[in-house]
């Protein structure tokens, strides 16, 4: 029987898994169809940095063997599902560059926990996905391996830093992907590319094997084509890990079951600070429609205030650069990747390797971070930022005493043209205005497609919920999704 031809652009995890289990397509054929599509489409998008074909073929053969033997009881919830991995997560023997030249040639000897968990659940890992260098950016133009193009409008950015993860799912190159979100890097590219993206609560998913950007903010999460798929993925990814002391031991809920529960009776908060000047009117209108859909399903809508929101962007850029400057000190030309050939002393080798290996945005952040941590400025910048971080967290806790979830925009604008903001880092940083406060507070969030602009550019709505309340976040996300007509 020839393999079934599935629509790779719309295929969901649930559909892919059941097609493989029913035998209408083999996992091997499904992986091959995706590789063919990557070869045909990705030259225009640039989302994959490396393909891990050998590993995918082996894993697919294992799944196919189980299906053939008739014993599918061992097959996990992602059996046969082709998935891509952001290049900041390590995969044994596959190149892991984090989008940087300094890690060119680095082949890690182990798997990140999130990667290992996906494979244990039956996923077929297709390859490594392009991203901003060390996950620093909002447009995926900071990758040393070229920008990613938005599949919905090739002359526009896909968002960042997980631009490759969002674009690959949107373009039908993998059914789902892993990204990371430090200050918006899952939610924002999901919104820009018209897919679902989840920021799990800090500590919900292990960070073991994640090349660190800012350790107190970094989270690993999924990109998918539906809220139900995102819930399935998070159920696989979440949970404690002996290799990461910050991975929480809180029990993992049945997200997929909870996502389908009705929302009637839930209280939804709308923060006035997220609807002020600078919000694109088409985005505002799309969010208002989402709120109407929730009302129609029995939610009540309440105004809430997050009064310290205006400090979120500067606070985030002080804390993340401080942590980045410390984390990136391990990139010294000795242990991983690139070593400069233009030096004759040890000190010069460190300096030259870092100079040749890091791109301009990473250098800017190392300088900033070193400055805010320096003896004379620590109290004025770093300590102050930590204090404001507490205030931002309290804003959310106060709001969540009144409401079950918060609904707001993900981004102030639709995706912009490639090159439009690259000369003005402050403009770029301001794009993170609606995403960074939740990052600093450690709460969970999801970006769900909620419409398009008159030009056909995707719009996302952000749903935030309190720490470890992913169930409510998914429920509200599903309710908004079910009201959409695409
Ligand atoms: N745009 C933000 C930054 O450049 C967020 C990045 C991220 O979440 N990794 O820091």
Image: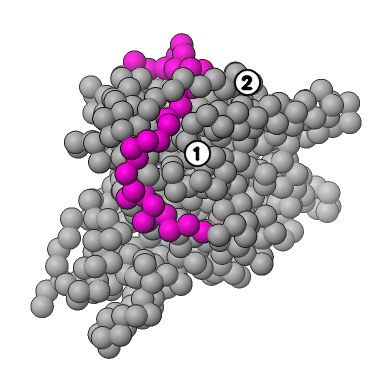
In the rendered image, residue 154, in percent from the top left (x then y), is placed at: 30, 35
> Does 397 sit left or right of 354 as displayed?
left
Determine the secondary structure under disc 2.
loop
Q: Is residue 34 above or below residue 224?
A: below
Question: Is the CB of the residue bearing disc 2 within 8 angstroms of ligand 1?
Answer: no
Question: Is the CB of the residue bearing disc 1 within 8 angstroms of ligand 1?
Answer: no
Query: What residue is shown with label 1?
Result: 465
325 or 345: which is nearer to us? 325
Q: Is residue 276 magenta?
A: yes
Q: Is residue 316 visible?
A: no
Identified at 66% across, 67% down, the residue is: 242
Query: What residue is shown with label 2?
Result: 308
Q: Magenta segment, which residues? A: 252-281
162 or 46: which is nearer to us? 162
Q: Quadrant of the C terminus?
A: top left
390 or 118: which is nearer to us? 390
Q: Quadrant of the N terminus?
A: bottom left
Identified at 75% across, 48% down, the residue is: 329
């Amino acid at each position: 029987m020839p393999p079934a031809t599935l629509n790779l652009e719309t295929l969901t995890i649930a559909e892919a898994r059941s097609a493989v289990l029913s035998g209408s397509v083999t996992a091997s054929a499904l992986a091959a169809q995706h590789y063919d599509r990557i070869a045909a489409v990705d030259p225009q998008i640039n989302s994959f940095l490396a393909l891990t074909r050998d590993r995918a073929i082996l894993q697919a053969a294992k799944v196919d063997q189980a299906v053939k033997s008739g014993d599918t009881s061992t097959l996990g919830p992602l059996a046969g599902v082709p998935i891509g991995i952001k290049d900041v997560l390590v995969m044994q023997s596959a190149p892991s560059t984090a989008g940087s030249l300094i890690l060119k040639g680095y082949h890690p000897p182990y798997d990140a926990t999130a990667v290992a968990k996906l494979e244990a659940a039956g996923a077929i890992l297709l390859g490594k996905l392009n991203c901003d260098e060390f996950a620093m950016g909002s447009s995926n133009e900071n990758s040393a391996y070229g920008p990613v193009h938005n599949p919905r409008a090739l002359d526009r950015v896909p968002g960042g830093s997980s631009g490759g993860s969002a674009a690959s799912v949107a373009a039908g190159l993998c059914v789902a992907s892993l990204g990371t979100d430090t200050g918006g890097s899952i939610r924002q590219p999901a919104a820009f590319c018209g897919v679902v993206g989840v920021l799990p609560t800090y500590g919900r998913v292990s960070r073991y094997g994640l090349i660190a950007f800012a350790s107190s903010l970094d989270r690993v999460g999924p990109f998918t084509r539906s809220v139900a798929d995102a819930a399935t993925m998070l159920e696989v990814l979440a949970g404690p890990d002996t290799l990461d002391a910050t991975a929480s031991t809180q029990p993992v809920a049945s997200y997929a079951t909870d996502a389908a529960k009705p929302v009637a009776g839930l209280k939804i908060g709308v923060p006035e600070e997220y609807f002020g000047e600078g919000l694109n009117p088409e985005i505002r209108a799309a969010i208002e429609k989402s709120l109407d859909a929730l009302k129609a399903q029995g939610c009540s809508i309440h105004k809430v205030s997050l009064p310290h929101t205006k400090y979120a962007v500067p606070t985030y850029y002080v804390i993340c650069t401080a942590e980045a400057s410390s984390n990136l000190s391990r990139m010294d030309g000795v242990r991983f990747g690139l070593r400069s050939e233009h030096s004759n002393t040890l000190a010069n080798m460190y300096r030259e390797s870092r100079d040749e290996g890091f791109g301009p945005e990473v250098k800017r952040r190392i300088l900033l971070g070193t400055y805010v941590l320096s003896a004379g400025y620590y109290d004025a910048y770093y300590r102050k930022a930590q204090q404001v971080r507490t205030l931002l967290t309290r804003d959310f806790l106060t709001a969540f005493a009144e409401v079950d979830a918060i609904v707001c925009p993900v981004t102030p604008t639709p995706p912009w043209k490639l090159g439009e903001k690259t000369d003005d880092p402050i403009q770029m940083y301001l794009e993170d205005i609606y995403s960074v406060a939740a990052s600093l507070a450690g709460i969970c969030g999801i970006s769900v497609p909620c419409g398009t602009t008159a030009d056909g550019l995707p719009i996302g709505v952000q749903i935030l919920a309190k720490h470890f309340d992913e169930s409510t976040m998914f429920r509200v996300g599903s309710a908004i999704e079910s009201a959409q007509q695409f």
